[in-house]
Amino acid sequence: MTPRTKFKTAMARLPLVAILRGLHPQEALAVGQVLVDAGWDLIEVPLNSPQPLQSIATLRKSFPQALVGAGTVLTSEDVRQVHSAGGELIVSPNFNPAVVAEAVRLGMVCLPGVMTASEAFAALAAGASGLKIFPAEMITPMVLKALRAVLPAETLVLPVGSISPLNMPAFRAAGANGFGIGSALFKPGMTPAQVAESAAGFEAAWAGTMRA
């Protein structure tokens, strides 16, 4: 299954990206297992985590059905290193044409971070698979709705930044196709059981059955 096919399948099933910032390699297997068991097939290990490439390699080998890759990818060399570790997903906080071009060249899914219409259209023209709307704290649902009105209808947009089960419905109503979930899902030191509980809460929120 190609990375793009995995991405399409995961987005149709549960379009939530697990952002595992601070994950240690020795935690990767257990945390990845509870996420995959809960239906999370989009997993990102930011490159400013401890030994991120080792965690990516472990996750990719252990869960071949999942789309695993890196976040905070800033350079073309970062892209190549992630690819060498087996990663298939590139997520950035910004739009860097060279990063997108290298990800496209290597057949990887690429989600650059954008805030404005200019950045969004430039990223799509460069070959981005979708758009990370970041930081969502500065891009309200009303702003997302305005962007959504001018973007091509097929564009996938995923707000990232302080996303919680409480603000997901407003962003969904504004046109979000999915979300990146960071510290509200995983923080260093959390047990797999705690991650599983958080994952279930977000899954329920996406399904529209908010927990008390």
Image: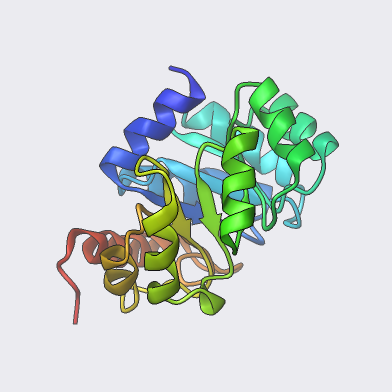
Q: Residue at x 32, y 44 (%)?
A: 37
Locate residue 138 relative to residue 153 in the image: left or right: right
Is residue 194 among what the camera can see?
no
Across the whole image, how many numbered discs are drawn on residues?
A: 0
The residue lying furthest to the bottom in this view is: 212
For the residue pair 82 and 195, the one nearer the viewer reads as 82
Residue 126 spot, x, y in % from top left: 65, 35
88 relative to 72, above or below: above
The residue lying furthest to the front in this view is: 150
65 relative to 159, above or below: above
Residue 36 spot, x, y in % from top left: 38, 43
For the residue pair 185 and 15, the one nearer the viewer reads as 15
Residue 128 spot, x, y in % from top left: 58, 38
Q: Residue at x 77, y 48 (%)?
A: 51
Color theme of the render: rainbow
Question: Looking at the rendering, in which quadrant would you find the N terminus?
Answer: top left
Q: Residue at x 80, y 39 (%)?
A: 78
The residue lying furthest to the left in this view is: 209
Residue 104 spot, x, y in % from top left: 64, 26
The residue lying furthest to the top in this view is: 1
Question: Looking at the rendering, in which quadrant would you find the C terminus?
Answer: bottom left
199 relative to 165, above or below: above
For the residue pair 96 and 26, the one nearer the viewer reads as 96
Q: Residue at x 79, y 32 (%)?
A: 81
Is residue 203 among what the camera can see?
yes
